[in-house]
Amino acid sequence: MNRLGIFGGSFDPPHVGHLQVALQAADELQLDAVLWIPASVSPHKTIETTLPASVRYEMVQLMTKLDDRFLLDSRELDRKGPSFTVDTVEELSQTYPDARLYLIIGEDSFLSLPTWKNPERIIELAQLVVYKRVTPQKGLVGNTHFACDHWLGGPLVDVTSTEIKDLLFKNKNADHLLTPEVSAFIKENGLYQK
């Protein structure tokens, strides 16, 4: 693999916005593969994820079946403790020494990059690919330390996992925000219900 996308997150649940970003990045950057990497414990989340890692892994597995360029990578789930991006990028640079790495992150993550563990090493090993959100998180200080290597084109991402969970907790329909496969999995397993 010469051009490898790194797409991590809690994926609680994975949704059509994630799919849109992964497809856009694969097309726009001519990636050979996009690694979907579910986080075990995200150090940037203020609340714990609702679902166990094994369940989120199964949902991401459904997403990776939607395009031949998508691969599921469990390294952060296999690793103990918080899922630091720098550790993952370091490992991938050793696993794929000849590949050019592209770290795909949201605008909110890009703005908070200076607070991450060893961000200098991350940008040394991977190019930053950022997708814009319709509503960036409130209270974030603008990133004035690091430049984005590539802003993704395409429509703005107008969906969050939090929004989906809120709908499902209230017994409202969220099918329009999920792929049919993930929606069916959530219903079959009674996930995100009070």
Image: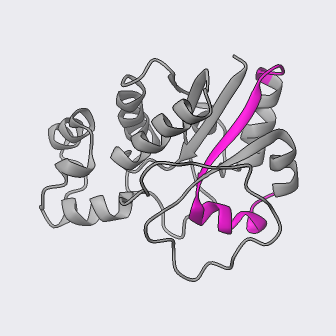
Quadrant of the snapshot with the N terminus: top right
Residue drawn at point x = 62 percent, y = 78 percent? 140
Residue drawn at point x = 83 percent, y = 68 percent? 145
The residue range painted magenta reads: 95-117
In the rendered image, the vertical position of residue 57 relative to residue 45, given as above or below:
above
Residue 34 seen in this snapshot: yes
Left or right, 16 with reference to 48: left
Residue drawn at point x = 41 percent, y = 35 percent? 60
Left or right, 109 with reference to 191: right
**Percent position of residue 135, x then y:** 44, 71
Residue nearest the viewer, comparing 5 with 31: 31
Residue 39 seen in this snapshot: no
**Percent position of residue 15, x then y:** 35, 46
Left or right, 104 with reference to 38: right
Left or right, 183 with reference to 46: left
**Percent position of residue 167, x then y:** 21, 63
Quadrant of the snapshot with the C terminus: bottom left
Residue drawn at point x = 36 percent, y = 36 percent? 59
